[in-house]
Image: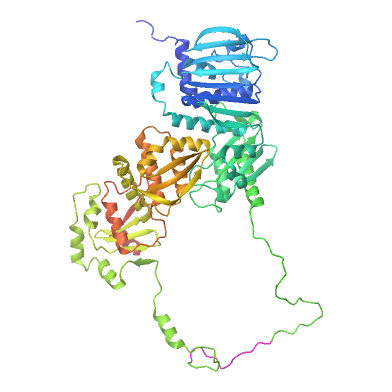
């Protein structure tokens, strides 16, 4: 029997490595820009064609490479960043594995033009699918110029799974924002299809944030600055009023490297617990500077997962820093010291007796006696009023929608056999929810509202409690999804169109969901400079903040991967349904509550919302009896 184990060819090994390092065009840009930063570049230009499918070009003015280094850089595990395994624990550069260029060259056609300052001419290296197709001496500026063409041209399966140009561009812009935020000493230019999207000069962090995300953010930033022996913390956090439900700007960096760290994220958000509503998230841009020996960045190929040696102490320091920033810059009511027209208040002087004002007491006054010596006091029958008040019962939070006597007679299920038989004779054809649909799909059922949030109705088996907001959201969601499929959702023109101003990345995401928004009934117009006019909304969502609604949809579309169009449509429809649904605390009439339950139980799956939350619960007679025992 022959041997079965063999070494893979270098080209195959490079493609396997590329699958971990290079996932999409945004990954190529990340690796090339990090190399440019490590090379000491102060100016980086990024040129894209077709969201990186056709061309990704990164031009920098860094140190450049010699002809030998330029060719060797495309070999696996070739790097100038480390020389031994011990160097992994004292990293001060973005790259260190020596896999990025080899992975890029394995799945694309690459042309590198580079020159060092001390060299008279530069060199041009051409690679295609890990093969060197030539190396020539050329005239080129100091620095490096990488042109990556036809990404995944030799891996059709990978290229097929790339998303649309708008989605890929949105991912590129997200990656670009992370790199531009932390490398404020570098000027960045981003051009897509001959259109300049960003031109950011070297500046400080605050001005870079404003340049990326809009001027409105400038007044919402609170400075964070703390330096200890373990960590130096710098950056900004957002004011509580700038918190968002979706799409919050949350960025953590460590030693100039973007990272995701749920533990430190909790340290920041816990400081806002009593300052912002539940479900909203604050903005923050925080950079941690620590000793490289105390962190490990060699955890994941994307280098966004980092382990800290002093994680718990840094958590405490970070939390204290954010609380200090919020407390130091929190707004408090000012004391008005203007004494004009103020009443004169006598001040106490030692040894000086101040005569107190004379108080006149009407000893004949009796509130329970009609008539009085005071002509100005009206005659009330206080005894009768008090008796009426004493006999009245206090209101309960649980209020029936109809008259109390009528409701009580209907709720008494054991004595009302006729009503119970009516409930039991419901429609049994909807098998998705048989235990309740056959009992409740009737008109004239007794309903009540609790705390402006729950709708209650009795059933022969006990009591049904429905969350009115979730129920209405689910009903609207199914309605919107059906309308998107048939494109029959009506639009309601707004009297005064609203203008929404977006960032570049938000604008790219909006264009990717433009057709789906139109199918939902939105009418938007591009006003230029990332401004859009909202001319019409879906019928039935009047009173909703249109700009906030569009912002929520953009944030929702940006949160996850868009694997299929249907999943994107579901997220958009659910965002719209949640925004347009009955708010918590709104009082409903008996007819409205009955209609809501009818619409809910007419759905195929009325039990859970699309995000997995329970719409209603049932409380059986046995459970109620146990509560009273």
Pick whichever, 153 or 137, lies toward us: 137
User: On the rendered image, what quadrant is the N terminus found in?
Assistant: top left
Please determine whether, in this image, residue 171 is positioned above or below residue 629: above
State left or right for residue 482 relative to residue 252.
left
Q: Assess whether residue 225 is covered by the magenta stretch.
A: no
Q: Where is residue 2 in the image (x, y as percent from the top left)?
A: 36, 5
Q: Position of residue 119 (x, y in %)?
A: 68, 11
Q: Where is residue 157 in the image (x, y as percent from the top left)?
A: 38, 20
Pick whichever, 397 or 190, lies toward us: 190
* Quarter of the figure with residue 522: top left
Residue positioned 30% across, 49% down in the render: 606
Pick whichever, 403 or 290, lies toward us: 403
The residue at the far top in this view is 2
Residue positioned 38% across, 55% down in the render: 582
Q: Mostly what secondary structure, the magenta segment?
A: loop
Q: In this picture, which residue range is highlighted in magenta? A: 358-369
State left or right for residue 126 relative to residue 434.
right
User: On the rendered image, what quadrant is the C terminus found in?
Assistant: bottom left
Q: Is residue 210 visible?
A: yes
Please determine whether, in this image, residue 168 is positioned above or below residue 547: above
Q: Which colour scheme is used?
A: rainbow
Please determine whether, in this image, residue 600 is positioned above or below residue 283: below
Q: Assess whether residue 362 is covered by the magenta stretch.
A: yes
Q: Where is residue 211 in the image (x, y as percent from the top left)?
A: 60, 37
* Quarter of the figure with residue 123: top right
Residue positioned 23% across, 66% down in the render: 414
Q: Is residue 304 visible?
A: no
């Amino acid at each position: 029997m022959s041997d079965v184990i063999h070494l893979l060819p270098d080209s195959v090994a490079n493609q396997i490595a590329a699958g971990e390092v290079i996932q999409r065009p945004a990954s190529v840009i990340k690796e090339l820009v990090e190399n440019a930063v490590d090379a000491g570049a102060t100016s980086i230009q990024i040129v894209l064609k077709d969201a990186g499918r056709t061309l990704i070009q990164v031009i920098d003015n860094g140190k450049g490479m010699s002809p030998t280094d330029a060719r060797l850089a495309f070999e696996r595990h070739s790097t100038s960043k480390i020389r031994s395994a011990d160097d992994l624990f004292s990293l001060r550069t973005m790259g260190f594995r020596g896999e990025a260029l080899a992975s890029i060259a394995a799945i694309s056609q690459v042309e590198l033009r580079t020159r060092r300052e001390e060299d008279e001419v530069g060199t041009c290296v051409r690679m295609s699918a890990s093969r060197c197709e030539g190396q020539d001496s050329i005239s080129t500026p100091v620095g490096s110029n990488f042109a990556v063409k036809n990404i995944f041209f030799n891996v059709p399966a990978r290229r097929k799974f790339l998303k649309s140009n708008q989605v890929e561009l949105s991912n590129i812009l997200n990656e670009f924002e992370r790199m531009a935020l932390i490398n404020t000493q570098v000027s960045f230019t981003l051009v897509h299809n001959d259109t300049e999207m960003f031109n950011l000069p070297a500046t400080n962090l605050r001005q870079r944030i404003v340049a990326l995300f809009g001027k409105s953010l400038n007044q919402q930033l609170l400075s964070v600055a703390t330096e200890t022996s373990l960590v130096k913390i710098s950056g900004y956090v957002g004011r509580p009023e700038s918190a968002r439900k979706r799409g919050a700007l949350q960025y953590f960096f460590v030693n100039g490297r973007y990272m995701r760290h749920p533990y430190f994220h909790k340290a920041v958000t816990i400081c806002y617990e009593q300052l912002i509503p539940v479900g909203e998230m604050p903005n923050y841009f925080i950079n941690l500077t620590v000793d490289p020996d105390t962190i490990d960045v060699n955890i994941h190929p994307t280098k966004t997962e980092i382990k800290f040696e002093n994680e718990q102490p840094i958590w405490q320091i970070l939390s204290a820093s954010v609380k200090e920033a919020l407390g130091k810059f929190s707004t408090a009511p000012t004391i008005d010291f203007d004494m004009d027209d103020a009443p004169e208040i006598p001040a106490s002087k030692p040894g000086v007796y101040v005569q107190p004002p004379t108080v006149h007491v009407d000893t004949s006054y009796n509130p329970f006696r009609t008539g009085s010596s005071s002509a100005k006091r009206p005659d009330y029958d206080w005894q009768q009023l008090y008796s009426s008040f004493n006999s009245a019962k206090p209101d309960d939070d649980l209020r029936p929608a109809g008259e109390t006597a009528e409701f009580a007679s209907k709720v008494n299920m054991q004595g009302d056999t006729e009503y119970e038989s009516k409930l039991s004779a419901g429609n049994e054809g909807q098998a998705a929810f048989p235990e309740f649909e056959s009992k409740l799909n009737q008109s004239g059922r007794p309903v009540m509202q609790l705390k402006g949030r729950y709708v209650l109705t009795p059933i022969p088996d006990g009591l049904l409690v429905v969350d009115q907001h979730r129920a209405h959201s689910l009903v609207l969601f199914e309605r919107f999804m059906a309308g998107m499929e048939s494109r029959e959702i009506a639009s309601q023109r707004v009297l005064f169109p609203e203008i929404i101003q977006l960032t570049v990345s938000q604008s790219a995401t909006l264009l990717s969901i433009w057709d789906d928004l139109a199918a939902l009934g939105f009418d938007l117009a591009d006003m230029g400079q990332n401004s859009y006019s909202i001319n019409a909304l879906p019928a039935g969502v009047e009173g909703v903040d249109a700009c906030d609604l569009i912002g929520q949809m953009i944030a929702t579309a940006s949160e996850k991967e868009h694997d299929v169009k249907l999943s994107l449509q579901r997220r958009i429809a659910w965002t719209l349904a949640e925004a347009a649904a009955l708010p918590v605390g709104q009082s409903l009439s008996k007819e409205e509550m009955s209609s809501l339950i009818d619409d809910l139980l007419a759905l195929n799956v009325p039990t859970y919302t699309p995000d997995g939350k329970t719409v209603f619960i049932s409380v059986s007679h046995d459970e109620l009896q146990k509560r009273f025992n």
